[in-house]
Image (cartoon, rainbow, N blue to C red):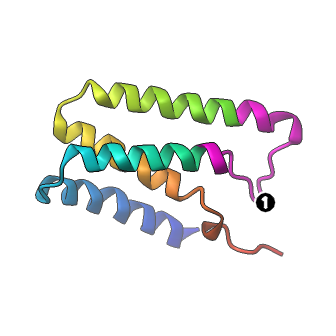
Amino acid sequence: TLQCHIQNILYFLFLPWLVLHLPLSTNIFYFLAMISFLLVISFAPAATKKQPIPKRLLKKKKVLSILSFIVIITIALTLEEVFKKNVISGVVIESITLLPIFFPKED
């Protein structure tokens, strides 16, 4: 929906600005990445009534979600601090969107 797109744009514009302007320790970002990893393990892949995931693909998509997370975080660890923090922030946002509270009840 349009509201969803606007919300995502705001997140992905505001969060990098916040990362640049708040002196947060990299260790905080590592901690958030670990929590995000647990969210990905617990809730990925996310399906909706409008876009269901066939049962035969669930395991494959879960494994791909976990592997993608690991690859992205591994790449982030090789980057300069500001880029590392921004990549981890993006991963955190994406993992939060996997939570069931972000899936409205559909009829």
Q: Quadrant of the C terminus?
A: bottom right
Residue 55 can be seen, yes or no: yes
Q: Is residue 12 above or below residue 26?
A: below
State the image coordinates of residue 9 (x, y, percent, origin top left): 38, 61
Residue placed most toward the observer, 27 or 54? 27
Label 1 sits on what residue type? Answer: Lys
As drawn, 64 above or below 45: above
Give the vertical position of 59 relative to 45 (above or below). above
Q: Residue at x 44, y 55 (%)?
A: 93
User: Relative to 105, is 18 on the left or the right?
Assistant: left
Residue 52: percent from left, percent from top: 81, 52
Residue 104 percent location from the top left of the image:
68, 73
Residue that badge 1 annotates: 50
Residue 100's quadrant in the figure?
A: bottom right
Q: Is residue 107 left or right of residue 61?
A: right
Horizontal side of 88 relative to 54 (left or right) equals left
Residue at (80, 46) in percent of width and height = 53
- Tell me the crowding category of disc 1: few under 14, some 14 to 19, or many 20 or more residues within 10 angstroms, Cα based: few
- At x 74%, y 53%, the residue is 47
Q: Over which residues does the magenta segment extend?
A: 41-61
